[in-house]
Amino acid sequence: RHPSELPTGSRAVQPQSMTPEPTSMTPEPKFTGVADSEADVETRAETTDSIREKDSDMKDAEMGLDIPAETAEPAPTRIMLLVMLSMFQGYASMVGPLQSAYKHELGVKHGTANAHVFTQAAVGVHYGKLIARLGHNVFFACLSPRTRVMIAMVFMFVGVLIPSLLVFTLKWHWVYSVFVAYMLSGLGLGIFEVTFLSVITPLGRPTKSWAIVGAPAGFATINILGLTLNSFSMPVVYIYWYIVACLPFGFYIFWQFAPRDKTELRTANFGASLRQACSWMPKMIPFFVAQFLSHFAMENWPAIFYMFHPPKVPLFDPKSDQHLMDWGQFFAITYIFIFLGDSISRRIAIYISTPSVKKRLVFLSFALALIVAGLYLESLAIAILIPLAIFMIFWGNGTIFGLTANHVDSHVPSEHNLAAYSVASFIGDLGSILGGVLVENTHDLFCQGHHGPFMC
């Protein structure tokens, strides 16, 4: 290289001649195949500059600042997993076994007027989510997404505190408390999911890949560990108080480690994003469809839960009273398969990146095919196949969730990030509500011809 082409830092260390010759008389450098002293100086200077640039980039990454595209992504902030875990433990208390415990504590009997009230009130969590998905862009438009996340966590805290304190501890058995508790929790969850994912986007894809595992981990903590302890005579109210205690801890982690100020993702007003929807929404349509179908399958899953009657589950023949397994143990194992399918697939899918629309559609189609195959296996009403079926359904769901997050972060303009998450989650919730409403219909469909001592 000619000295005039060197970086400024390199020219500063060039040997100075006592009697400089005119520029026109300076001979062109010749390559001799041997590094002379001047070349060594150039190499050392360039190496020093390179190291300084890398050190600067590393410092920027640690501070949460924008870094050049060619550099590696920032190290994951794994502790963000605990924020999502604390919220989804609250969600787990509103579906499945803890919902049944809440109903039992209230003294609600099947077939009574209160039973109908309880069922309708329990759906409030899904209505709350549906309202909050888009409503937060209206009612909290003046607040930053970071502030909305903290408000959402307060909603969830109050929603879980109602059954823990008023119902289980103080024995206030008012059936309409279900509506208040579940609606507040649903509003909190609906705001949280979309805003949380948007807020942590500047922390990089590695952080998000860890954070989204908090959802299945939250359900696993309550439905596997919690129910296992409960089977050893631990009162269910302890599980509720554990959930209440975790939420302030998750709130503090988010407040301490989430991006803020200049490092926070700047998003457009929701109305502005919708007016510019033609720039980002058309390519989101396949993800909207997939979200709807996957949420339908997830919320329709309780139909299987109600097919098998305690205390035993017939493993091979639904009409048989042999080869039985304890009901609680069977569903504890099933929840393990749910956790594995949902959590592993999310971490894999969020790293699947391709600019090809066709390839993204292939991945989505594969996920939907797994869900359909899982539903078919469930319809056979053979208990030994249920863990595999539910694993396939939740692997498909986790894949769709991860692919959607990847697409929004990689192919949607950053200013529309929050709007894209909001609309995708809203459509997913429509599927959840439909799946929840049709639980009884699915139960009756799958039970046809499969009635037995412990079935249907």
Image (tube, grey):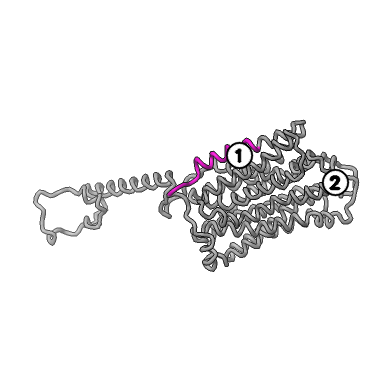
Residue at screen point 56% across, 40% down: 251
**Among all residues in the image, which is located at the extreme bottom?**
278
Residue 331 appears in view: no
Residue 7: % across, % down: 26, 53
**Among all residues in the image, which is located at the extreme left?**
19
For label 1, the SS is: helix
For label 2, the SS is: loop
Residue 272 appears in view: yes
Type of amino acid under label 1: Leu
- Disc number placed over residue 247 in the picture, else none: 1
- Disc number placed over residue 8 in the picture, else none: none
Type of amino acid under label 2: His
Image quarter of residue 225: top right
Q: Marks 2 and 1: in contact by CB < 8 Å?
A: no
Residue 338: % across, % down: 70, 47
In the image: residue 172, left or right of residue 265? right
* Label 1 neighbour load within 10 Å: few <14, some 14-19, many 20+: many
Residue 260 forms part of the magenta stretch: yes
Image quarter of residue 88: top right
* Label 2 neighbour load within 10 Å: few <14, some 14-19, many 20+: few
Residue 348: % across, % down: 59, 51
* Secondary structure predominantly adopted by residues drawn in magenta: helix
Number of numbered markers: 2
In the image: residue 236, left or right of residue 43? right
In the rendered image, which quarter contains the N terminus? Answer: bottom left
Residue at screen point 51% across, 63% down: 272
- Disc number placed over residue 110 in the picture, else none: 2
Residue nearest the viewer, comparing 206 with 288: 288
Looking at the rendering, the stretch of residues picked out in magenta corresponds to: 243-261
Residue 143 forms part of the magenta stretch: no
Between discs 1 and 2, the one toward the N terminus? 2
